[in-house]
Image: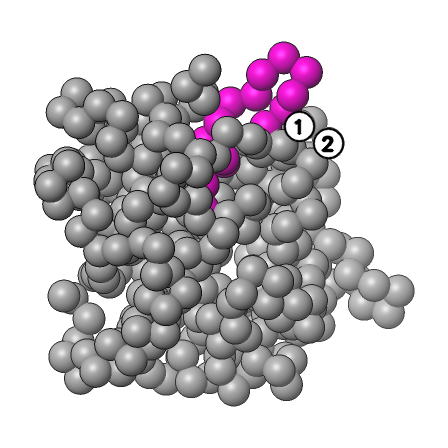
């Protein structure tokens, strides 16, 4: 594993807690039914992410968005049907989610060798892990055995995903409803060390923060000036919504620089910077900024735990042949 040896036993301890909640899943689920599955997925992800690092951020985000709506059942991959817009059509997912084509490529290669065997929801979980490895050297075992859901509803996205404007207490409650702790929430927020965000997600922090301040006073002034150049006041008037790196320091590297940016008041989203200013989470932010290897280990364990949210197993759901449509 790429996680430093000094954190090995710490990782085992928190991984053990994660495994308790995912007892219906197991590492090596496809060892006999499709032994090449994980290798195919890692090859596919590595090739795509090495060419375009933004796809790695997208694949990790797909996993998060999938698990927080209906559990980790691959529902985020389903296309809309006439009269029934799917999760993909919600503004939180469209056009911001990326990497669907990578999932499709891996699925096609696997189906050619092991038809109707490997679920799309498991491919998502493996692809997120392999993205973390390619971009950050963070490697961990992924328990598998998930089955795919057959329902995907646009309206359910807004009811479950946290919003960019959430304060620390709201974020805590949102993650608690999914069985995740406050520390896991802060740990998973570190995924914002890669990827981008549209200007529309933080424009209010630059021009219309509240009745007292035009721009968010918790934001570093030089950072604010930089963002105003990238996102001028007329942004979005002509249908344009530029993107900005969530981490301007090491935008293509999954690391703990995200927390260092927060300490310097350079968090892009309001829900990012609030993690430093809130007494609920500020100590956790400072700890993650100081201890890189510890954060690596915690991130791996939190990803495993998140991947166990409301999974379908056994005879529940199905194994989709095409990740974009149900089998019937």
For the residue labelled by badge 2, is the local secondary structure a helix, a strand or a loop? loop
Identify the residue at image location x=63%, y=12%. 82
Residue at the spot of label 2: 237
Magenta span contains residue 117: no
From the viewer's perspective, tell me whether residue 239 is left or right of residue 264.
right
Q: Residues within 10 Å of mark 2 (few under 14, many from 20)?
A: few
Is residue 289 depicted above or below 25 in this figure?
Answer: below
Picture quarter containing residue 255? bottom left
- Percent across and percent down for residue 308 are 41, 56
Q: Which residues are magenta?
A: 72-86
Q: Is residue 288 visible?
A: yes
Identify the residue at image location x=73%, y=63%. 215
- Percent across and percent down for residue 302 are 39, 66
Q: Is residue 191 visible?
A: no
Picture quarter containing residue 313? top left
In the image, farthest residue toward the right: 211
Mark on residue 254? Answer: none
Find out whether the residues at labels 2 and 1 contact each other: C-beta distance under 8 Å.
no
Identify the residue at image location x=72%, y=44%. 233
Mark on residue 239? Answer: 1
From the image, give the main secondary structure of the stretch colored magenta: loop
From the viewer's perspective, tell me whether residue 77 is left or right of residue 37.
right
203 or 121, nearer to the observer: 121
User: Cα distance, mark 2 to mark 1?
Assistant: 6 Å
Identify the residue at image location x=66%, y=40%. 156
From the viewer's perspective, tell me whether residue 219 is left or right of residue 21.
right
């Amino acid at each position: 594993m790429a996680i430093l040896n000094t954190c090995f036993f710490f990782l085992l301890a928190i991984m053990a807690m994660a495994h308790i909640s995912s007892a219906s899943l197991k590492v090596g689920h496809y060892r006999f039914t499709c032994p090449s599955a994980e290798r195919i997925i890692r090859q596919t992800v590595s090739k795509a992410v090495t060419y375009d690092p933004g796809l790695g951020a997208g694949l990790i985000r797909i996993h998060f968005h999938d698990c927080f709506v209906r559990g980790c059942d691959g529902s985020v991959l389903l296309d809309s049907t006439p009269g029934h817009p799917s999760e993909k059509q919600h503004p939180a997912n469209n056009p911001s989610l990326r990497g669907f084509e990578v999932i499709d490529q891996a699925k096609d290669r696997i189906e050619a060798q092991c038809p109707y065997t490997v679920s799309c929801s498991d491919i998502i979980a493996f692809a997120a892990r392999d993205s973390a490895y390619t971009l950050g050297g963070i490697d961990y075992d992924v328990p598998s055995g998930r089955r795919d859901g057959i329902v995907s509803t646009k309206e359910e996205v807004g009811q479950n995903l946290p919003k960019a404007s959430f304060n620390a207490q709201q974020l805590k409650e949102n993650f608690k409803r999914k069985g995740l702790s406050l520390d896991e929430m802060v740990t998973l927020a570190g995924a914002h060390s890669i990827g981008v965000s549209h200007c529309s997600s933080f424009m209010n922090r630059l021009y219309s923060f509240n009745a007292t301040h035009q721009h968010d006073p918790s934001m570093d002034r030089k950072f604010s000036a930089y963002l105003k150049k990238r996102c001028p006041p007329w942004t979005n008037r002509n249908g344009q919504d530029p993107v900005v790196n969530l981490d301007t320091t090491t935008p293509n590297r999954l690391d703990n620089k995200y927390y260092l940016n927060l300490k310097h008041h350079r968090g892009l989203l309001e829900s990012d910077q609030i993690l430093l200013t809130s007494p609920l989470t500020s100590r956790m932010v400072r700890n993650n900024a100081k201890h890189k290897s510890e954060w690596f280990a915690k991130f791996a364990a939190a990803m495993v735990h998140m991947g166990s949210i409301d999974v379908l197993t056994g005879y529940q759901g199905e194994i989709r042949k095409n990740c974009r449509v149900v089998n019937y």
